[in-house]
Image (tube, rainbow, N blue to C red):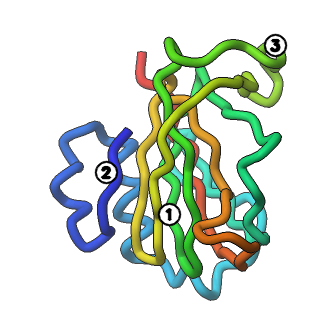
Amino acid sequence: MVTDHLSRACVYYGLGRGIRDALRFLAQADLAAVSPGRHELSGGSYAMVSEYETKAAEGALYEAHRRFVDVQFVVSGSERIGYAPLEALREAQPYDDERDVVKLEGEGDPVLLTAGQFAVLWPGDGHMPGIHAGDRPAHVRKVVIKVPVAG
């Protein structure tokens, strides 16, 4: 997992063309005006724009993907993302090939993302997004870019 502010995104361009293109898209698009939903990008990547209220961590599950890297960017608001390597988690629900997601349970560490920050999550990174940054729900606008795993 990598987290940083979008103003330093160029530091991570060497992680691959798909990551570079995703970070450039985030830096150049008017993300406050992009409509919610799925938006196709180049190279098999796509962006999911959503708005929601954060949730409590109690009862929430981690997730991981096999075919895509997530580049998650908080446009407005703030949230915590639980993080744990897959080896520290156990399967709670079997892998769903159609949705490219496995649901997991276990213990991890919370990472705070505020407006302007991004996280890059690889297939080995269990993550639990959308968790309250404080003790009550907060409104978040977020873009998740799904980048196909190379090779």
On the image, which quarter does residue 50 sit in? bottom right
Return the disc, 3 or 2, that comes first in the chain's sequence: 2
- Asked if 32 appears above or below 40 in the picture, the reply is below
Q: Residue at the spot x=62%, y=28% of the render?
A: 64
Q: Are marks 1 and 2 in contact (CB under 8 Å)?
A: no
On the rendered structure, is 85 left or right of 127? left
Q: How many marks?
A: 3
Q: Amino acid at mark 3?
A: Pro
On the image, which quarter does residue 90 sit in? top right
Q: Amino acid at mark 2?
A: Arg
On the rendered structure, is 16 left or right of 70? left
Q: Secondary structure at mark 1?
A: strand
Report which residue position mark 1 lands on: 73
Q: Residue at the spot x=73%, y=27% of the render?
A: 101
Q: CA distance from mark 3 to mark 1?
A: 27 Å
Residue 94 is marked as 3
Q: Amino acid at mark 1?
A: Phe
Q: CA distance from mark 3 to mark 2?
A: 31 Å
Q: How many neighbours does mark 2 have within 10 angstroms: few (below 14), some (14-19), or many (20 or more)?
A: some
Place of residue 114 in the rendered image (x, y in percent of width and height, measured from the top left): 46, 72
Q: How many neighbours does mark 3 have within 10 angstroms: few (below 14), some (14-19), or many (20 or more)?
A: few
Q: Residue at the spot x=72%, y=26% of the render?
A: 100
Q: CA distance from mark 1 to mark 2?
A: 14 Å
